[in-house]
Amino acid sequence: MVGPETHPVKFEYILALGSNVGDRNFYLDQAISGLARLGTVRATTRRYETWPILIRAQGKFLNQGVWLETTTEPEALLGQILALEKEIGRIPRIKNGPREIDIDIVWFSGGTFRSAQLHIPHPFNRAREWVRQIMCELKPDAIDPEVGLRYARIRGRTIMNIQDFAKKKSLGEKIAVVTCYDYAFARLLARTSIDAILVGDSLGNVMQGHANTLPVTVEEMVYHARIVRRGAPQAFLIVDLPFLSYQTSVRDAVANAGRIIKETGADAVKLEGLFLPQIRALIKSGIPVMGHLGFTPQSLLAFGGYRVQGKTPSSAENILRAAAALEKAGVFAIVLEMVPTELAGRVTASLSIPTIGIGAGDLTDGQVLVLNDLLGLDPDFSPRFVRRYANLSASVISAVEQYAADVRERKFPNEQERF
Ligand code: KIV
């Protein structure tokens, strides 16, 4: 008797090829013809030049994506790929060093796969924008299993989670953070590769016109964070806990941070200083916390003004100790504001979580700037540590003057601009 016909299961794989030694095009061609012996090559992408993630000095890779269909299971395919790399002429060198050919399995139709030898998706996927590009060329509708969104939707964006902060530090990748307070700018930031958005209580200064951040309320933070989230639905969003929303008690801290997370869709909160019981309670409740040391604006009155912190040996020691305590309490990153560069470097070197500097020099793991400052929106505010990447105040003033003049001179609206 003949039983029911069984068909072997076909797996689809997306492979990322790379070469940065010798004739890179030759090695990629060899890899593609070798892969064609292991299954059906359904499609290949164009070739991309990219920098290596870890050791930049080794020179750029030439990369290409391949869509392979085969009945081979993931681990067996890995074995075949390693043999193919050897056959093509890959010479064993240091880990993550230069290579004639490298073939990584970055995606497969089964979603995720974990064994001692193999992780699919590949652990470096998140850090490699070009992997998202090849996924978009080959399978734009496939879901990134780590993010839960279609590749077509996440290309060009850095989708962070709290583990990625420490991962980026360990890979030596700098982290770029910017503040934002409204929907219009959030929509623009959503089109950039910024790593995280901070709804800072600096909104007290830049949006509300107060002299400092002290008057800002939880209600106002919720309002601004909600509209930022609406404009940047996928961004890693951190929201400041405002003055006296957490200093007063552990209970207040959990209630206010919980409210912010629930009502705004934020990914984390930030709080200033060394409020360890509060931080521990928040983390225990499942709320990721970013720390903030050095000049902490909510303590402006106690500091007696906007002053660089950590200039004396004892205050530097205090900051170093506070950073260690924050790391131990479980914060995922620490903002270091207005501290000497050398101290920021020491703090950064002493931690495995990243430091994000503002007015703290170039030795931190990342930087944060107030969006309005980097865009040059306030002609009267330009502290030493801000770099203006645009002069929007001048553009706004001149655009509005031009509009007013056109109205007065009856030049606006013209024939095309009316019904
Ligand atoms: O409120 C804010 O914008 C901040 C940044 C300056 C770090 O805390």
Image (cartoon, rainbow, N blue to C red):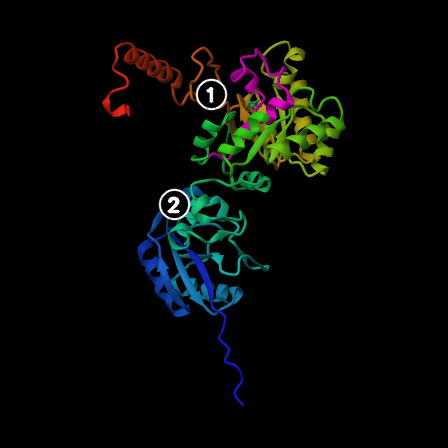
Is residue 172 shown above or below 310? below
> Residue drawn at (59%, 13%), measured in percent from left and top?
212
In this view, the residue in front, 256 or 386, is 256
Residue 225: image location, x then y, percent: 56, 28
Q: Tell me where residue 293 appears, x and y as whole percent.
A: 63, 24
| Location of mark 1 (residue) | 372
Q: Quarter holding the C terminus?
A: top left
In the depicted view, which residue is nearer to us: 3 or 81?
Answer: 3
Identify which residue is drawn at 47% across, 20% down.
372
Viewer-side residue, 227 vs 419: 419
Within-10-Å neighbours for mark 2: few <14, some 14–19, many 20+: some
Q: Nearer the viewer, mark 2 or mark 1?
A: 1
Q: Is residue 216 magenta?
A: yes
| x and y, in percent, of residue 277 in the image | 75, 30
Q: Would residue 353 appear left or right of 88 to someone viewing this image?
A: right
The amino acid on which the numbered mark 1 sits, given as a three-letter code, is Asn
The 10 Å Cα crowd at callout 1, few under 14, some 14 to 19, many 20 or more, is many
Please tell me whether mark 1 sits on a helix, a strand or a loop: helix
Task: Determine the image quadrant of residue 216.
Answer: top right
- What label sits on residue 50 in the rendered view? 2
From where the camera sits, is residue 411 visible? yes
Span highlighted in magenta in the image: 194-222
Task: Name the residue type under label 2.
Answer: Thr
Task: Measure how far apart labels 2 and 1 are at the Cα level.
Answer: 32 Å
**Residue 63 among magenta residues:** no
Q: Quadrant of the N terminus?
A: bottom right
Image vertical order of residue 79 relative to residue 170, above or below: below
